[in-house]
Amino acid sequence: MTRVMISVDAVVSEELLSAFPQLIARVQEPRSTITGEIADQQELQGLLNFLSSMGIDVTGIVTIPD
């Protein structure tokens, strides 16, 4: 598992992320950060594809050290 923080140019609700229950959204309008554990590259790509399909632009991805 890898801990990540993803920055996006949108307000992201916990409800929107319900498909990814291990992630937490923190909103500082007009942006949000999404933080949590990602199992592998495939799960990260799935999350990025989901955000893209919702019209949400990802501005950064950072791995958080243990």
Image: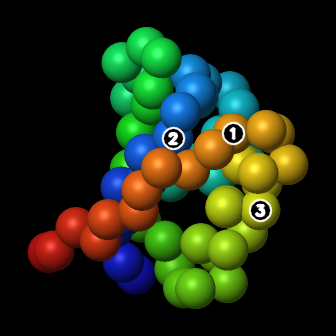
Task: Quickly name the residue at label 2.
Answer: 8
* Left or right side of 47 for 23: left
Q: Is residue 61 above or below residue 27?
A: below
Q: Amino acid at mark 3?
A: Asn
Q: Nearer the viewer, residue 37 or 31?
A: 31
> How far from the left and from the top, in percent, is residue 21?
59, 48
Classed neighbour count for the residue bearing mark 2: other residues with Cα under 10 Å, few (<14), some (14–19), many (≥20) = many
Q: Is residue 18 above or below residue 65?
A: above
Helix, strand or loop at disc 1?
loop
Labels 1 and 2 touching (C-beta < 8 A) = yes
> Of marks 1 and 2, which one's residue comes earlier in the chain?
2
- The residue positioned 77% from the left and 62% from the top of the image is 49
Quarter of the image containing the C terminus?
Answer: bottom left
Classed neighbour count for the residue bearing mark 3: other residues with Cα under 10 Å, few (<14), some (14–19), many (≥20) = few
Q: Which mark is residue 49?
A: 3
Task: Quickly name the residue at label 1.
Answer: 56
> Of marks 3 and 1, which one's residue comes earlier in the chain?
3
> How far from the left and from the top, in percent, is residue 39?
52, 80
Report whether residue 64 is seen: yes
- The residue positioned 69% from the left and 39% from the top of the image is 56
